[in-house]
Amino acid sequence: MKTALDRRSLLAGSLMLGAGSLALPRLAFAQGTGSRNLLFVLLRGAADGMAMLAPVGDPGLAALRGASLADYEGAPRLGSFFAVHPALAEVAAATQSGEALFVHATATVYRERSHFDAQNLLETGGTAPYSIKDGWLNRLAALLNEGAPAPLRALAIAQAVPLALRGDAPVSNYAPSALPAASEDLLARVSQLYAADSEFGPLWARALETKAMAQDDGLKNLRDARAAGELAASLMRDAGGARIGMIELGGWDTHANQRGAFARSARGLDALLGAYKSGMGAAWADTLVVVATEFGRTARLNGTVGTDHGTASAALVMGGRVRGGRVIADWPGLADRQLFEGRDLAPTTSLESLLAGAAAEHMRLDPELAMTRLFPGRSAVPLAGIVRS
Amino acid sequence: MPDAPLLFSGTLTHACDPLPHERRMSRPSIALSRFGYGLSAHDSPPADPRRYLLGQLDAYDPAPPAIAGRMRSRGETGAMVELVRSLRQDRRAALAMADTPSTMGAQSAPSEDPRAAALEGLPPEYRSKLDEARQVLLGDISARVGLAVSSPTPMIERLVHFWSNHFSVSVGKVGTQFEVGPHEFTAIRPHVLGRFSDMLKAAVLHPAMLLYLDQFQSIGPNAPFTQRRGRRGGDQPERPRGLNENLAREVLELHTLGVDGGYSQSDVTELARALTGWTVPGIGRVGRFAEDQPSGAAFVALVHEPGARRVLGRSYPAGQAGQALTILDDLARHPATARHIATKLARHFAGDTPPPALTARLEADFLRTGGDLASLTRTLIDAPEVWTPEPVKFRAPFEWLIGALRLTGVGKLPPQRILGALNELGQMPWRAPSPAGYDDVAASWAGPDALVRRVEMAERIAANVPSDDVLARAEAAFPGALGDATRTQLQRAESGSQALALLLVSPEMMRR
């Protein structure tokens, strides 16, 4: 049995030393974010981390994944141990230019296998599903708003506000529509109609504001991932734009015939991230993207060449300030006895630590405070050294 | 896990602020809009709200003429799945010979119509099949909307859609387009006032569900078929050859016990084993051994995992197709199921955080009657918690659209327009993003973008229908419940059409 440090030293690129060893000086919180942007991408349906970033250096992989290993011949490598799925070309390029990193074998504190509970926990930040009503991203906005002259703009690029962004801090949402715009006169009358309504009044005010920001996007829906990435960038890159954004991607619940299904979803994610990065232009230098999913999938392919609900997965961090080009993982191994409950990649890094640590460093908040507020009740320490200060 | 948390609850604290006095609903208004889909332009408000609702239990027609032709699925699905499988093999063969990667159906260059571009690259027989599937789906969605808009029993239609969402299926998978309509028409509609156990078996073992949750290709690892293939040694690497637990897990988590219902991973696996053999007709080499089942599914004994099962501590002897049926019957009367169903029903009719007393009465009713859904419906009608004057819910998009079409008296709309409207509003029938169905809490729907879309849609609807006497129609649709702010805006509107658009997005119309 190797020590934790030995296992870590297997890994490519610069290593994650113990959490805290690269800790930033404790900054006073809410020092001001300047124009720092944070985009959270939630992969709904449990994306397979072992397909996203395949541990090709692990001798156990071949027995578990057999046929799908062909996909990684010639795929971009992160050191000798990990290979990036070939559909994630833009992500791999960003990794190689030092602007992206993966975290592997990561999971929230959730250890059951329900998508809906797991997403609830990941989005609310509670220690149990349904124990908290608002979302961690909304609480992050609230933290940043404390003492600020005006609340920052937080925006979901989605037809409905996802749970992670729901809560007391004002948020808006927007998705392109094929409907003809309503007449100005009707909009004004609706404003009067809702003026006295304590719920619709504020919602409507934010709707009009976001609508003005997004005018003439030329899109009819969010189906084209590249266009969605460009749209997200157009709503976040300017000084008056949103500082916190969220976007959701589905299609990851690959119970059967996983190879094709995963590649399709991964191509969409890659197109979105690539378009967002180039769309942000100069603002990319101040932008952080975090991509996460509710849990991973079974290590072994199932009877229908897919994977079932599992435990640990991978997460991705991209951005102009990311200390990238590496994988942060305390690799648990793929031998039968190393798998969680004999079936899943075992979780060794807290996903909440990553989310809180990355958000705090990037937004210049005290990481401990961020952890307490965004993910209360965790014993894990926020990950440090994700972002260059 | 803490004691009985409320599944799917997600009310925001600020949504619980005390409501201003003017947001109060009357009993007739509650009967129309909280229980049903609102007043139809051709009706007048009910004089006796309770009798109006109870009468619907007798008047409900589970199989109206509009869907008579769709009560039997047409066996297209198996053929379509087989077609796609053979095309995949052709494609693999073609890929193996060619150096350049194919772009069939994926990653087409951005174009005006990506769907047309994607179809362009497909073989003609598949293209025509897809087109047929699309037409069938369009017809079924249009029929569903038409039934709800013209229904004299809108409360029961609401129950149909509630249960259809509880047993959510989605058109994401090959062949499901032919089956999702019949799933609701034959597995849900006949049972909404019947027994939960009958609906459970019909809905879970319907081809739509077997396809959607991958059951149709799940095979017992020790089934005769697997053994025979193993002996021959000619296993193709990408062909399904074992157990898939997707449906089994969702049956326990979503359809019956609920996520905290006390089941374990081994219960999931055992139920998955019991379900092997249940598949769709006309599929695969084993298809000719299939026995047709009343649910429209087929059972293939050759792929059924032999042996006894143990689920939730109970033993089930070896028993082919009947094994799964017996387990489902037991799940249907489990106390955790009663609690799960009671909670969801209460949330749907009495608000996002349902009163515990109501949930408890529904639960007791479910246990006492063995899941008699007509009895649960009467319990809801007689529950004071459902008659609270404050609105308890933000109408979900489908509900709002049906309400708007009933209120405006729109006749039959072209199916394509119905589809477009539902798509823009964000709640297409049979396309929920997950097997949990569409969310049933206000916070999931009441966002800035949703308001804009409804305003845009309202202006469009109002421009195309008669718009005389809007104020009188408003008073009728929300009897004794029209607020001053809305009345003032309707009176000030510059045209009947504008007044109608405002009525369609008024708080009275958006909440119930």
Image (tube, coloured by chain):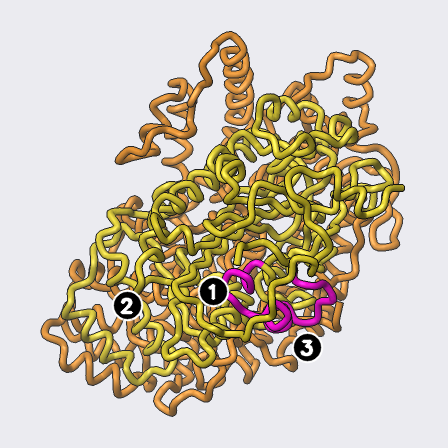
Chain colours: A yellow, B orange
Task: Estimate the x, y position of residue A143 in percent, counting from the top left.
Answer: 51, 74
Q: CA distance from mark 2 to mark 1?
A: 20 Å
Under circle 3, the secondary element is helix
Q: Residue at x 39, y 35 (%)?
A: B134
| A118 horizontally vs A44: left or right | right
Q: Quadrant of the N terminus of chain B?
A: bottom right
Q: Chain of mark 1?
A: B
Per the rendering, the mark at residue A209 is 2
Q: Label 1 is placed on what type of residue?
A: Ser
- The answer to which quarter of the image holds residue B355 is bottom right
Q: Which residue is under mark 1?
A: B444
Q: CA distance from mark 1 to mark 3?
A: 25 Å
Q: Nearer the viewer, residue A270 or B405?
A: A270
**Which residues lie in the magenta part?**
A358-382
Q: Residue at x 66, y 71 (%)?
A: A376
Task: Estimate the x, y position of residue B70 in percent, counting from the top left.
Answer: 45, 40
Task: Estimate the x, y position of residue B37 in percent, counting from the top left.
Answer: 39, 67
Under circle 1, the secondary element is helix
Q: Residue at x 87, y 36 (%)?
A: B307
Q: Nearer the viewer, residue A363 or B9?
A: A363
Tell me if I can see residue B182 in this picture: no
Q: Label 2 is placed on what type of residue?
A: Glu
Under circle 2, the secondary element is helix
Residue at the extreme left of the image, as rendered: B494
Q: Chain of mark 3?
A: B
Q: Chain of mark 2?
A: A
Q: Which residue is under mark 3?
A: B360
Residue B450 forms part of the magenta stretch: no
Between marks 2 and 1 in the image, the one whose residue lies nearer the viewer = 2
